[in-house]
Amino acid sequence: MGTRERRAREKEQRRQDILDAARKLFWASGYEGTTMPQIAQAAELAAGTLYLYFPSKQALYAELLIEGYDLLVGRLEGAIHADTPSRQQVEALIDVFMAFAREYPEYFDIIFFVVQREGHSVEGLDLPPQQRQRLATRQDSCKQLASRALENAHVAGQGAALALTVDAVWSMLAGVVLYFHRDEPNAFAAVAARAKQLIIYSLFGG
């Protein structure tokens, strides 16, 4: 391995170390409770080095959002197939959503809850235009996959109505995960199954 390749690999590893440290701190201490010096210390870097990779805490948080969405989108894409009936596609998407929450609780919290719990919003983050566009593309990909699966559901509607249905189902699932995954883990599987049953019934009937 040449010097250039080794340096590129070391740089990428350092970047990943920063993201790993930040993810754990944001999840444990919240957005306001986490500082860039704390992240630098957890990643075993000088604070000045951290800013060479991420210009602000907001940019670092957004990069974790993008990382989490990439994981979620990949799993959602693998769950649906064009030749599968709409009902089965929606069932598969719900299963993937719940499995993602169990398998990646840190990413799930960062995507849905960490900023919102403290009165902020993802839209309110001050981000470079290119990073904001990357984030928006990932968010749209999740909703497009859900919209595609719901197009044949008799209550989903089209256009604005379909988008509203997607947002409603997305929010209901996130609420199930927030309450039961955090507070009553033993009941999570049963409640998640019931939520899936109710959503499928409301969209497709018996």
Image (cartoon, rainbow, N blue to C red):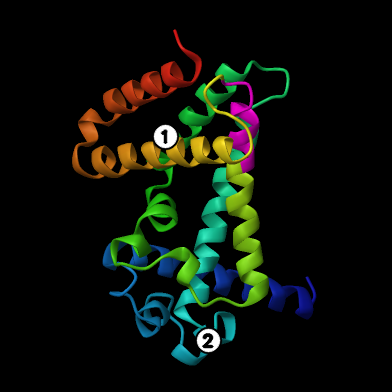
Relative height, residue 181 to residue 128 (above, below): above
Position of residue 87 measured from the top left corner of the image (x, y, whole percent):
56, 17
Left of 128 or right of it: where is 1?
A: right
Q: Position of residue 133 (x, y in %)?
A: 66, 65
Residue drawn at (58%, 41%) of the image: 160
Q: Quadrant of the C terminus?
A: top left
Residue at the image point whose x is 51% and y is 40% from the top: 164
Tell me which amino acid carries mark 1: Met
Q: Secondary structure at mark 2?
A: helix
Q: Which mark is residue 51?
A: 2
Task: Name which residue type carries label 2.
Answer: Tyr
Judge from the rendering whether residue 110 lies leftward or rightward of residue 33; answer left or right: right
Q: Position of residue 90 (x, y in %)?
A: 54, 25
Within 10 Å of the Cα at label 1, are there few (<14), some (14-19), or many (20+) other Cα atoms? many
Q: Nearer the viewer, residue 102 or 154?
A: 154
| 114 w.r.t. 169: above or below | below
Mark 1 lies on residue = 98
What is the span of residues highlighted in magenta in the rendered image? 144-153
Q: Which quadrant of the structure image shows residue 11?
A: bottom right
